[in-house]
Amino acid sequence: MDGSLSLAVSTVIFALRPHPRTRLPVLWVPLVRRIRQPHQGRWALPGGPLGAEEGLATSAARTLQETTRLSPRYLEQLYAFGGTDRAPTTAERTVSVVYWALVRPEEADAGAVGVNVQWFVADELPELAFDHSLIVEYALWRLRNKVEYSRIAAAFLGESFTLAELRGVHEAVLQRSLEPSNFRRQIETSGRLVATDAYRTGGRHRPARLYRHDRSIQLSDNGPLTER
Amino acid sequence: MDGSLSLAVSTVIFALRPHPRTRLPVLWVPLVRRIRQPHQGRWALPGGPLGAEEGLATSAARTLQETTRLSPRYLEQLYAFGGTDRAPTTAERTVSVVYWALVRPEEADAGAVGVNVQWFVADELPELAFDHSLIVEYALWRLRNKVEYSRIAAAFLGESFTLAELRGVHEAVLQRSLEPSNFRRQIETSGRLVATDAYRTGGRHRPARLYRHDRSIQLSDNGPLTER
DNA sequence: CCAATAGTGTCTTTTAGACAATATCAA
DNA sequence: TTGATATTGTCTAAAAGACACTATTGG
């Protein structure tokens, strides 16, 4: 130990995609293969050292962009990890400020990313480098809590969407089915959605009304904090 | 700007004490007067650089001990602040990992602390150094949110307490009165309290049963995180 | 017409809030 | 006995969950 300390910013990036077997939508995360010691060959969260003139959230967004070619639809600080035992074999002490993000992976699909980047089903990860397994677990816990009382599910959808589509996001994140009529009532009484006069047609059934989110309401209430 | 980066750990320390005018219990925080530039003379959160061999929470607990001679009854990470504009006049860039803590100030009272430390009513602070006013505001928001759905209020009380005492803590934190019978029912159905067979006597009224918290339940559910 | 999903309405259970009524102590 | 707070109970309103029923489309 030489007492030197470095500060890194990493990001847990979530997207919804069909599960390879079940075809049902599930959460995925992109990971980066480590090409040097320690933990060479293992998968790790995308990230890197904080730029000298860069804010923490800016650094997370940059990493996200470099890793996935996407912009985050939602970005929030998760936690700062700074235990002295995070990388016991290395001389350098690293504190990591970790963010979590939601993206919409439509355009840029798995192929567009580099050879050392790969998307994984979030609930079926291999053992990751450092304490990154714990970090992803914690990010999943936060996401699943937060989707129940905030509007972050919107980050996975486009400008307008049907209630069934929104419900599908909730079901995929929470891993359980939700009663359509009760879900509708809950969303309606929350007052966070605005009905448009457009409909989604094409299915062999009654067309569904399209809704959009009330733009005057933040995706998430973080109190006095409004980073970026 | 020379690009160097330092990492500091600060702590927002909350205690309950009577308001100087109303005598009603309110939240107080200890602040430290800055004895050098920038912001010389202003009040700031206690804290300092992260020790080389020290975990983040350990550093926060040490600062708390040095500032108040107390041990935290509850300690949780608040947020990592790392904007590039936090101290524009200085050459050094500082990222602060901030914790918040609850203490019981019975023994060590205001007098015991150093000359450059002073306790303030949390809702009546002067303008603080750096972005510390925003930080305290955010910590207050977190505390007031969390007291409603967790057991952290227990950190302000002793081993056993009456429901009126517990309600008093909630009322002081939330700044509103709570209906005694409904508060009782809510606490009872939560199953987090255990009735003892002891009573608090001495008042000119019916003695109140003493309760204690179920030790098998954490003060706060932080999911997969169990720092320390 | 039928299959499928959208959307409405109803009933029950749970939870929160207001508040009346009774219990028990110290003075 | 009285004043004070503890404790129990009751009523109502709001929210959550289960589920029946009607509406509208494409085929």
Image (cartoon, coloured by chain):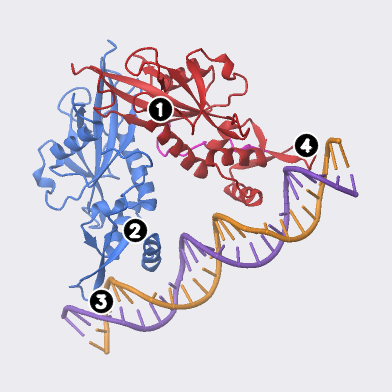
Chain colours: A blue, B red, C orange, D purple
Tell me the distance, in whole angstroms, between the alpha carbons under discs 1 and 3: 59 Å
* Residue indicated by mark 2: A192
Q: Nearer the viewer, residue B14 or A171?
A: B14
Q: Are marks 4 and 3 in contact (CB under 8 Å)?
A: no
Closer to us: mark 4 or mark 1? Answer: 1
Tell me the distance, in whole angstroms, between the alpha carbons under discs 1 and 2: 35 Å
* N-terminal label among 2 and 3: 2
- Kindly identify which chain the residue marked by label 3 belongs to: A
* N-terminal label among 4 and 1: 1
Tell me the distance, in whole angstroms, between the alpha carbons under discs 4 and 2: 50 Å
User: Of helix, strand and loop, which mostly describes the magenta segment?
Assistant: loop
Instruction: Pinpoint residue A105: horizontal percent, then vertical percent.
Output: 17, 50
Instruction: Report the span colored magenta.
Output: B211-228
Q: Which mark, residue A206?
A: 3
Tell me the distance, in whole angstroms, between the alpha carbons under discs 4 and 3: 68 Å
Instruction: Say yes or no: labels 4 and 1 on the same chain.
Output: yes
- Kindly identify which chain the residue marked by label 4 belongs to: B
Instruction: Pinpoint residue A53: horizontal percent, then vertical percent.
Output: 18, 26
Instruction: Say yes or no: labels 1 and 3 on the same chain.
Output: no
Up the image or down, C20 lies above or below A111; here it is below
Q: Secondary structure at mark 2?
A: loop
Quadrant occupied by the C terminus of chain B: top left
Q: Are marks 1 and 2 in contact (CB under 8 Å)?
A: no
Q: Which mark, residue B203?
A: 4
Residue type indicated by callout 1: Glu
